[in-house]
Image (spheres, rainbow, N blue to C red):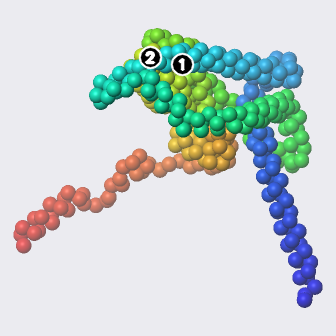
Amino acid sequence: MPRWLPRAMVTALALYGCFRLGSWAFGQLIGLLINILIAFFLALAIEPAISRMAARGMRRGPATFLVFLGVLIAGVGFVLLLGSMLAGQIVDMVEEFPKYLDSVINWVNQTFHTELSRVEVQDSLIHSDWLQKYVQNSATGVLDVSTTVLGGLFRLLTIFLFSFYFAADGPRLRRALCSVLPPSRQAEVLRAWEIAVDKTGGYIYSRGLMALVSGAAHYILLVVLGVPYAPALAVWVGLVSQFIPTIGTYLAGALPMLIAFTVNPWYALWVLGFVVVYQQFENYVLQPKLTSRTVDIHPAVAFGSVIAGTALLGAVGALIAIPAVATLQAFLGAYVKRYDVTDDPRVHGGQRLRRGVPLLSRFRRAVRGGDGA
């Protein structure tokens, strides 16, 4: 046996053990790493507001606390307003459920010439097997729901703590990061950090403006139709449609349609048509103007980044995909050398003109030559 073989085997086994240990540790810490990533982007989003307050003489710690307090008050107020609206609306729908059921049964009897009654339908629903199984599963899943809620609250608290530290100690964190890098690399890191702050803050700013415009437009529609809880529904549509990528528009429009259906079924169709029309206006008119100076990326690139972020990190990846791609695009744009484009018709979608005899003239000559032969 060669002398180096035992040492190579021990080294290979040690490397394999380190790889397995690192994979296990990464699997255990993936949740914490995702929370830190969310906290970092949240800190980047509120960095411009904190920097402005610090430039006016306020310390970063109190400035960060005030910003977080404002975000917390707005979030809690929105949840309480939406919760009270949903609770009242659910109570009204439960009270009016017999009337809705009677209207549906009358329509079915008149259309299909049946003789259904509400009592028979209620008895069949109450004594059905799927309802009993659903109640049993709901009773056994109360503990799981409670555990999920507590875990979500703990995760939210973790994100807020890390984001608070990142925002309050931003300059110290940058100095600590630059202290382990040579001077030539420090400028690049600081430039990347500045671009990330601008793009993330610009993304939040543009989304906030579009949420305001969307909420105002839907509020006017709901007031005209006489749909109850119009302010809360307008805030719901504005926030959900802008800060939940790809499917946020459909989630935002479902709740106003449901509430409008309780008033008049035709109002739900009006709300659906308005949501579709406004979405087209937002995609082709409003969004390009608002995001041209903040997050200037192609819609196809934005859509692809959202899909890729969702595939990698789920809902978290969908939220941070666009500012991350915008930051990467702006950072690479500073180092990519560009050249002047030649004046070629193919650049504008045309075809290059061939030199020599035009095609029509050659075709005429060929036809004349055939006739003479």
Near mark 2 (Cα within 10 A), the count class, few <14, some 14-19 or many ≥20, is few
Q: Residue at x 46, y 10 (%)?
A: 226
Q: Residue at x 80, y 43 (%)?
A: 32
Residue reaching furthest bottom? 1
Which residue is tagged 2? 99
Residue closer to the observer: 102 or 3: 102
Q: Give the Cα separation between the discs numbered 2 and 1.
A: 10 Å
For residue 63, what is the image quadrant?
Answer: top right
For residue 245, what is the image quadrant?
Answer: top right
Give the structural element (helix, strand or loop) at label 1. Answer: helix
Picture coordinates of residue 31 (x, y %)?
77, 44
Which residue is tagged 1? 94
85 to 153, vertically: above or below: above
Residue 23 visible within the image: yes
Residue closer to the observer: 189 or 45: 45
Q: Residue at x 79, y 39 (%)?
A: 36
Quadrant that contains the N terminus: bottom right
Q: How many marks?
A: 2
Residue type indicated by callout 2: Lys
Residue 330 visible within the image: no
Near mark 1 (Cα within 10 A), the count class, few <14, some 14-19 or many ≥20, is few
Residue closer to the observer: 351 or 369: 351
Residue closer to the observer: 15 or 264: 264
Q: Residue at x 47, y 18 (%)?
A: 98
Query: In the drawing, does residue 225 fall left or right of residue 67?
Result: left
